[in-house]
Amino acid sequence: ALSAVAGQLGVNKSELLLGEDGADSDDESAKRGSTSAAVRAALTETRVIAETKQFLADEGVNVDQLEQGVRDPASVPRSKTCILIKNLPAQADGVQLRQMFATFGELGNFVMPPSKTMALVAFFSAKEAKKAFRGLAYKRYKQVPLYLEWAPEDVVSVRDSNKPPAEQ
């Protein structure tokens, strides 16, 4: 989350956490700075979550169903055509990810919020989705493995393939 916001603001993570003037030299100021850093980190994470939820909702994602699937996975049936891509690196490239999945079949939808923390990819065919899942689960992407899981059922709809995907 910090990497995502730092990237959006064009600063590095230490500038985001420590503020413009960096760390202070005396002990009391250092204590205040560390508290401020913790508060800044919490606020940053809250902001990223809120922006991500709003983006996903704007793209037609059933955010409540997605959250329920994360909170209590056993309570929500899983899709056979939609894959949730989790823990993406801050340098994730939506166009590149979309192309990686599209090599396995025709995509009905691809949604990646600006935070680049996760993405949803829906296939028209369950067979193609299964091939993509098997072919890409734990594959290295930007120095980290791709963590995939089947998204909750009806979390995202497929759209006309002629309509451009959400901008990554």
Image (cartoon, helix red, strand yellow):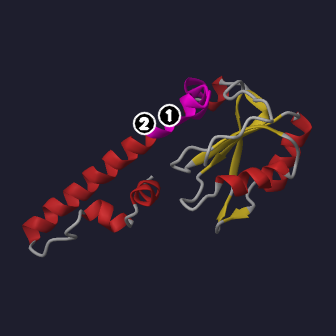
Q: Nearer the viewer, residue 27 or 12?
A: 12
Using the rendered view, name the quadrant where residue 60 is placed. top right
C-alpha span from label 2 to label 1: 5 Å
| Chief SS of the magenta region | helix
Asked whether the viewer can see residue 67, the reply is no
Q: Residue at x 86, y 52 (%)?
A: 103
Using the rendered view, name the quadrant where residue 15 is placed. bottom left
Secondary structure at badge 1 equals helix
Q: Residue at x 82, y 49 (%)?
A: 102
Numbered badge on residue 50: 2
Q: Residue at x 26, y 58 (%)?
A: 37
- Seen from this angle, which residue lies furthest bottom? 25
Asked whether the viewer can see residue 77, the reply is yes
Residue occupied by mark 1: 53
Report the magenta residues as a range: 51-70
Marks 2,1: beta carbons within 8 A: yes
In the rendered structure, the answer to whether residue 166 lies left or right of residue 47 reads right
37 is higher (above) or lower (below) than 110: below
Q: Position of residue 30 (x, y in %)?
A: 15, 67
Q: Position of residue 6 (x, y in %)?
A: 40, 59
Q: Is residue 150 magenta?
A: no
Label 1 is placed on what type of residue? Lys
Using the rendered view, name the quadrant where residue 121 is placed. top right
Secondary structure at badge 2 equals helix
In the rendered structure, the answer to whether residue 114 lies left or right of residue 163 reads left
85 is higher (above) or lower (below) than 153: below
120 is higher (above) or lower (below) than 32: above
Pointer 1 local density, CA inside 10 Å: few below 14, some 14–19, many at least 20: some
In the rendered structure, the answer to whether residue 133 lies left or right of residue 151 reads right
Q: Position of residue 55 (x, y in %)?
A: 52, 36
